[in-house]
Image (spheres, grey):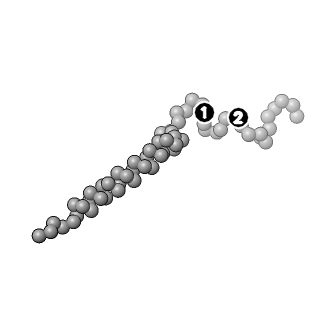
Amino acid sequence: MGDTPTGASAPDIAPGGGADEPIPFMQQVLDNPFLLLFLGITIPTVFYILWGIMEVISIPIAN
């Protein structure tokens, strides 16, 4: 009942993880709110512009 640890307490370091492991790229992206805001505005804008260009190109030429 002394100083030996029992299995009831949570470990200090998560299993399989250490402080020296690099942070994965997707976690860095998802943790950055300004990057998410930028991507959330830029990607739909680019798709809508491309969609509009494709629509204009597909209009038949009047005779």
Q: For this view, does 21 lie left or right of residue 12? A: left
Q: Residues within 10 Å of mark 1 (few under 14, many from 20)?
A: few
Q: Which of the numbered marks, if any, corresponds to residue 12?
A: 2
Residue drawn at 61 percent across, 38 percent down? 16
Q: On the image, numbered disc 1 is attached to which residue?
A: 18
User: Which of the pair 36/18 is nearer the observer?
Assistant: 36
User: Which of the pair 60/9 is nearer the observer?
Assistant: 60
Residue drawn at 60 percent across, 33 percent down? 18
Q: In the image as oriented, which residue stretches furthest toward the bottom?
A: 63
Location of the N terminus by quadrant is: top right
Q: Is residue 55 above or below residue 34?
A: below
Is residue 27 at all visible to an observer of this figure?
no
Tell me the amino acid under the disc marked 2. Asp
In the rendering, at what x and y percent does residue 8 appear?
A: 79, 42
Tell me the amino acid under the disc marked 1. Gly
Residue drawn at 70 percent across, 34 percent down? 12
SS label for mark 2: loop
How far apart marks 2 and 1 lie (CA) works out to 10 Å
Is residue 2 at all visible to an observer of this figure?
yes
SS label for mark 1: loop
In the rendering, at what x and y percent does residue 30 appear?
A: 51, 44
User: Which of the pair 22/57 is nearer the observer?
Assistant: 57
In the rendering, at what x and y percent does residue 27 appear?
A: 52, 41
Q: Which of the numbered marks, if any, corresponds to residue 49?
A: none
Q: Is residue 47 above or below residue 22?
A: below
Location of the C terminus by quadrant is: bottom left
* Residue 2 in which image quadrant: top right
Do the residues bearing badges 2 and 1 touch, measured as CB atoms within 8 Å?
Answer: no
Residue drawn at 22 percent across, 64 percent down? 58
Q: Residues within 10 Å of mark 2 (few under 14, many from 20)?
A: few
